[in-house]
Image: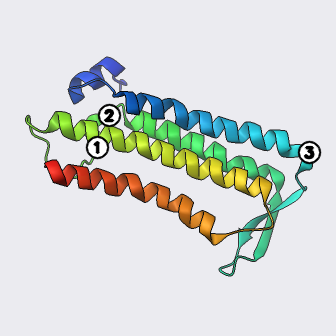
Amino acid sequence: MRIPSRAEVDAFCGSPSTRWQRVLGIVSPVLLIGAIVFILIRWPQLPEQIPSHYNFAGEVDGYSGRGMLLLMPILGLVMDAVLVLAGRFPKSWNTGAKITLFNRVRVYRLVRDLMAELRLAGALFFAGFGVYQSLLPEHFSGNILGILTLLFFVPIVRYFVRLGIKG
C-alpha cells in the first residue's frame, strides 16, 4: 500500500493544513523530546529505584528502575507518530458524520484539528507525567493524573460540539 503525499491528502480534504494544525504539529514532538532531555539532565539526581505504581490511596506499592521515567515520553512519541500516520489516510477516519460533497471540507478540517489537538494532549500527558515523576517520585497526586487525563477529553468534546453546531 502506497502512502499518499501531503498534497494528495490536502487535495482529498479540500484544504491545506491550518496554521493551528502546523503549530501543534511542531509543539507536540518538541514537548516530548524536551521531556526526555529534562529527565536525562536530572538523571544523576534521580534514585536508582522510583515508584512505578500507586494504590487508590496514592501510596506507593511498586518500584522500577529510573529508566522507566523515559518510557512515558517515548510512548508519547510513538502515539504522536501513529496520529501523524493516521492523518495520511483520511478515508479511514471515522468522523461521526456522513461525509457529503457539501460538508467534507469542514468535517475533514475539524478531524484534522482534532488529531492535532490529540497530539498536543498526548504530548502534555506523557511529557507531563514523566517530568512530574522525575521531580516528585514519592509524592503522587491523583489530581495530576486526573488533570492530564482530562486533556484527552477536551479536544474530543470540542470536536463533537463543533461538528454538531454546524452539521
Q: Mark 1 Cα within 10 Å, few/some/many (few <14, many 20+)? A: few
Is residue 18 or residue 53 the one in the foreground?
A: 18
Q: Secondary structure at mark 2?
A: loop
Rendered residue at 39%/32% (across/down): 21
Q: Name the residue carrying label 3.
A: 44
Tell me, yes or no, if residue 5 can be seen here. Answer: no
Residue type highlighted by circle 3: Pro
Identify the secondary structure beneath mark 3.
helix
Q: Amino acid at mark 1?
A: Trp
Query: Which element type, helix, strand or loop, lies under badge 1?
Result: loop
Residue at 64% x, 47% y: name it. Answer: 127
Label 2 – label 3 distance at C-alpha: 43 Å
Q: Is residue 135 left or right of residue 49?
A: left
Callout 2–callout 1 Cβ contact below 8 Å: yes
Q: CA distance from mark 2 to mark 1?
A: 7 Å
Q: Where does the image place residue 6, in percent across and percent down from the top left?
A: 35, 21
Give residue 116's position: percent from left, percent from top: 41, 39
Locate residue 114 relative to residue 109 in the image: left or right.
right
Comparing labels 2 and 3, the label whose residue is closer to the camera: 3
First in sequence: mark 3 vs mark 1: 3
Query: Left or right: where does residue 44 sit relative to residue 56?
Result: right
**Where is residue 28 shown, x and y percent of the image?**
54, 37
Q: Residues within 10 Å of mark 2 (few under 14, many from 20)?
A: some
The label on residue 89 is 2
Residue 33 located left or right of residue 37: left
Q: Which mark is residue 93?
A: 1
Specify the quadrant of the image occupied by residue 78: top right
Mark in the foreground, 3 or 1: 3
